[in-house]
Image: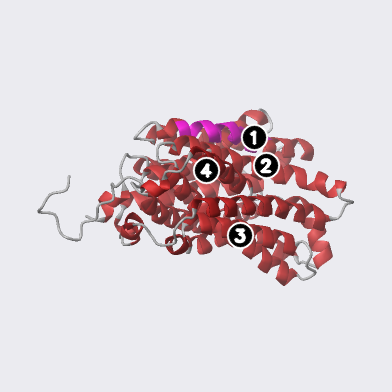
Amino acid sequence: MSTAAEPATTLRTDVPPAPAARAPKALGALLVVAVVAAALNLRPVVTSLGPVLDSVRTDLGMSAAVAGLLTAVPALCFAVFGIAAPALARRIGPIAVVAAGMGAIALGVLARSFTGSTAVFLLLTAVALAGVAVANVLLPVVIKRYFPQRVGPMIGLYSMALSVGTSAAAAATVPLTGALGGNWRLGLGAWGLLAAAAAVLWLVTLFLRRERSSATAAARAAARLPILRSRTAWALALFFGLQSTSAYAAMGWLPKIYQDAGVSAGASGVLLAEVMAVSVPASFVLPNLAARRGDQRIFVVVLGLCGIAGFTGLLFAAGTAPWLWAGLVGLSMCAFPLALTMLGLRARTPGGVTQLSAFAQSLGYLISVPGPIVIGGLYQSTGGWTVPLAFLALLLVPQILVGLRAGLARHIEDEAVR
């Protein structure tokens, strides 16, 4: 409670969203559709490339080293460009920045598909990933600002759409390329049209809402928050980074793990698809359940134990019950929508969520960059999967520990001003 004895610099961050943020139902419905459209475009930039990478390398004369670099670039771009999102949001508003992000994705994906230069291909991929980075940070902010009473359901819808976009791009790019005459440029570039449609939706939303570029008092206050003092912010950043490390390592190496255990190449691909498919309904249900509780620690523990069980099963019996281990690993990867939900709940205002989201996601993605590389190095140096899988299982222990801190019902504003 605020008292007269409080210092003059104490910031009131428990103010409700401004009246301007409460939109008519029609505009609210439009924004729901826009959020789903944006989420669908946050991963095809990456997952559409893998299935046609051999064709891309051949046509562009791309070396194996550069192709390997493409696997580390996304997380690095998410970390670097995500840092700029709060400043851009304060200057022109989060909806305008997300609209620009969708435009950057469309431009980058379409243009890179028709270049003959490896350097230009990498540059345009970075442009698209910059758009993904700012949208990554600001979509939870948009949800907090315009759906303050429905954070859980909206994060669930956003997470489910993101999972659908991730798996659809991975599964459909090769058939789409075949349907377009076998030209990888058309198959890859088609995903830019999806991003262009999302950009149009966000531009219409921006026009109808006439969002002011000037920052609200709450956003300006959040900009001055010394977030580095918040233990909850640090815990969320570490939780985000550790779950991203496990997820990227699993997505990158799971087929190889199964194949080395005697599972056919086709079946290993289906098992990877199962991992992604499990997360689609779970990504919708979990945020709803988590948002109903002030404390999310039980979910942190359950998902962490699923991951430990999954990686341990792969370690000792990958070929015995492959569907079970894939399902458990898929459930453990639902730590991502849980992390997004906690980002929306650990700050009182949209401005606070902006700063927390940028800090936690940027630092988290930076932490995750070495993960798949380390796993590959351990596999190469030991000649098997025992050490890499044991490492992944053990990595879930600190994830649970920092998640227990991040899951406490606290707000960064209270910690940052102490």
Front residue (pair 329, 283): 283
In the rendered image, residue 330, in percent from the top left (x then y), is placed at 59, 36
- Callouts 3 and 1 close, C-beta under 8 Å: no
> Which contiguous range is marked in magenta?
274-288
Name the residue that disc number 4 marks.
27
Figure check: 90 above or below 331: below
- Give SS at disc 4: helix
Q: Earlier in the sequence, mark 1 or mark 4?
A: 4
Name the residue that disc number 2 marks.
167
- Residue placed at 43% from the left, 33% from the top? 290
- What secondary structure predominates along the stretch shown in magenta? helix
Q: Earlier in the sequence, mark 3 or mark 1?
A: 3
Mark 1 surroundings: few (<14), some (14-19) or many (≥20) residues within 10 A: some
Q: Earlier in the sequence, mark 1 or mark 2?
A: 2
Of the two numbered discs 1 and 4 in the rendering, the one whose residue sits closer to the viewer: 4
In the rendered image, residue 82, in percent from the top left (x then y), is placed at 50, 60
- Residue placed at 77% from the left, 61% from the top? 113
- Give SS at disc 1: helix
Name the residue that disc number 3 marks.
129
- Callouts 1 and 4 close, C-beta under 8 Å: no
Mark-to-mark CA distance, 4 and 3: 28 Å
- Callouts 1 and 2 close, C-beta under 8 Å: yes
- Callouts 3 and 2 close, C-beta under 8 Å: no
Mark-to-mark CA distance, 1 and 4: 31 Å
Figure check: 236 above or below 319: below
Name the residue that disc number 1 marks.
277
Place residue 284 in its image quadrant: top right
Figure check: 290 above or below 384: above
5 sits to left or right of 12? left
